[in-house]
Amino acid sequence: MTPRHVAVLLDGHAQWAAAKGLTESEGFRASCAKQVDVARWCHDLGAHTVTLRVVPHPGAAPDHLPAEADWDRMLEAFRNGWEGAPAIALNHLGDLGRLPAGLADRLRAACTPAVTGARPSLQVNLAVGYDGHDELLDALRWVLRTAQDGGRGLDELAASLAADDLGERLASRTLPPVDLFVRAAGGQHLSGLLLWQSVYSEFHFSDIPAPALTRDDLAVAFADYSGRNRRYGK
C-alpha cells in the first residue's frame, strides 16, 4: 500500500542550527531548501501529490525567509523536474498578501492552479503564508454570505448545511485527501496544515530535524504506512 498524497511538515530547524553553531535563520533556510529533496524522494517512493510546509517560527522576522536567490533556485528545481518526473505541477497554498512582495511575485509566476484531467507525474503544493483556520473560516464566510444574498435565514441554512458545502469552497478543494502525514523533529501536531484533507490521514512522527532528513527517513515513513490497517474513522 503506497500513499498517493503525502503531506510533510518540516520542523526542527532551530535545534539543528543550534547544534551546528548556525543562526536560526540559516536553519530555516536549510529546511526550505530541503523541500525539493523531500518532493523528489516522495515521488521516487510512489506518491503522486506532495504538500510541503516549513513550520514558521512564532513572530519570525522577514529575514528568516530564504533570500530571493534561494527561492529562485528552489522554484527552478521544481520547474525543471528531475529524471523520472518530467511533468511537475507546482501549486501554491496560502495568502500571498502575507508574504514579502518579491516572494509573492515569484510564487505567483512559478505556480499553476491544481491540475485537473490528465495528471502530471507529480503535483507539489507549497504551503507558504498558509493558515488552516483561516481557510476554513473563509469557506464558512462564503457560505453565510451566499445564503444571505439568496434570502435564506440562519435556521434554513443550518438545517441544510452539509460538509460538501464547506469543502467545495476551500482554497485547497482540488487536493485529494492526505493519505500519509509526516512531521519532522518529533512534534505530534498538524500546525494547521490541510485540516480538512487530513481528517482520516495516517501519521508518522520522525525525530529527525528537517534539514537532516534523508531518503531513508522518508522510506521508513512509507514502510510504516504500508503496514497500517486504514479504517477511515470507522
Image (cartoon, helix red, strand yellow):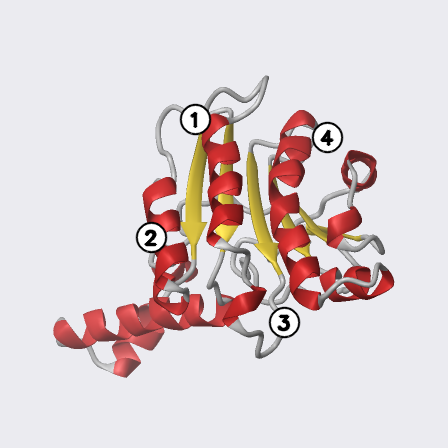
Residue at 40% of width from left, 45% of height from top?
174
Distance of mark 2 from mark 1, alpha carbons? Answer: 26 Å
Query: Which tag, 4 or 3, sits closer to the chain's start?
Result: 4
| C-beta proximity under 8 Å, tags 2 and 1 | no
Q: Earlier in the sequence, mark 1 or mark 3?
A: 3
Kind of residue indicated by mark 2 = Asp
Q: Amino acid at mark 3?
A: His
Whole-percent x and y of residue 123? 49, 35
Which residue in the structure is indicated by mark 1?
A: 119
| Helix, strand or loop at mark 4 | loop
Residue 14 to residue 104: above or below: below
Foreground mark, 2 or 1? 2
Look at mark 2 in the image and give the residue it sits on. Answer: 105
Q: Is disc 1 placed on a helix, strand or loop?
A: loop
User: Against 154, is 121 above or below?
Assistant: above
Q: Is residue 33 visible to the viewer in this orientation of the structure?
A: yes
Earlier along the polypeptide chain: callout 2 or callout 1?
2
Q: CA distance from mark 3 to mark 2?
A: 23 Å
Q: Nearer the viewer, residue 131 or 21?
A: 21
How far is mark 2 from mark 4, CA to CA? 39 Å
Residue contact at pointers 4 and 1, CB within 8 angstroms: no
Dot 4 corresponds to which residue?
A: 1
Q: Position of residue 9 (x, y in %)?
A: 66, 55
Nearer to us in this view, 69 or 82: 69
At x 63% / y 63%, what residue is drawn?
55
Q: Alpha-carbon distance for marks 4 and 1?
A: 20 Å
Q: Quadrant of residue 217?
A: top right
The local crowd at label 1, few if under 14, some if 14 to 19, many if 20 or more residues have their Cα within 10 Å, is few
> Badge 2, how many Cα within 10 Å: few under 14, some, many 20+?
few
The kind of secondary structure element at disc 3 is: loop
